[in-house]
Image (cartoon, rainbow, N blue to C red):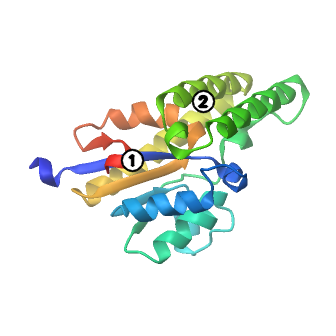
Amino acid sequence: MNPSTRTRLAILGTMSDLHRQPISYDLDCLQRIVADISPDLLCAEITREAWEHDDFSQAPLEVREALAPTIASMDIVLIPVAPTREQFPDFAPASGWRRRLVRTFDRFLRWGQIQANDVETINGSWFSVFCHTVCWLTEMVWTANDRAEWERQNKQLVENIVRAVQRDPGRRVLVAVQCQRLHRLIPLLHAHDDLFNIVAYQNL
């Protein structure tokens, strides 16, 4: 394949409701980033069913209030890649010490996200290590069935991304997903290096 026609794929970590906090990486910032990059395809956390019914009501905040309005005004194709509506917090135990421990980890993660503040840091190496560690500890508190379901969900999400690339090769693809998924998705995506080059979002 000609290198100039090879698919380029970048991953952008998002932060759900924290985009409403007084930090640099707010919803307006997210909109500007996507508009500036102007990818051919934008893979986002919305299910195919919701997308087909034009129903963003149950999608994550950043999809509803930043990504969807941006692509509506631009020539960007939205690719729904979420296999279900479940998000990382939905796997938390319902009660007991496990629930309290998950809440502690969540507060720690949110503290780290606020301290990181800007999009470059959130998507940088040191925060990646921090987020990976906190998320891994959180997952260890879940039940074995929930951990397996989370892993299955992320594998299916990657399969949806891969299918989109295979259907329309040679495009510039931006994958916007909540940062808690990144340590799961990145190794799975690297397993498909034959299909695309993974680049930093700034270089897409």
Give percent across and percent down for residue 135: 64, 29
Q: Secondary structure at mark 2?
A: helix
Q: Is residue 46 visible?
A: no
| Marks 2 and 1 close (CB-CB < 8 Å) | no
Q: For this rendering, which residue is in front, 83 or 19?
A: 19
Q: Quadrant of residue 150?
A: top right
Q: Residues within 10 Å of mark 2 (few under 14, many from 20)?
A: many
Q: Is residue 84 visible?
A: yes
**Residue beneath disc 2:** 131
Q: Position of residue 14 (x, y in %)?
A: 57, 48
Q: Which residue is mark 1?
A: 201
User: Which amino acid is tagged 1?
Assistant: Tyr
Mark 1, secondary structure of its residue: helix
Q: Residue at x 37, y 38 (%)?
A: 189
- The residue located at (45%, 60%) in the rendering is 34
**In 3D space, how far apart are the residues under numbered discs 2 and 1 (Cα atoms)?**
18 Å
Q: In the image shown, does 163 or 187 lie closer to the viewer?
A: 187
* The residue positioned farthest toward the bottom in the image shown: 73
Numbered label tally = 2
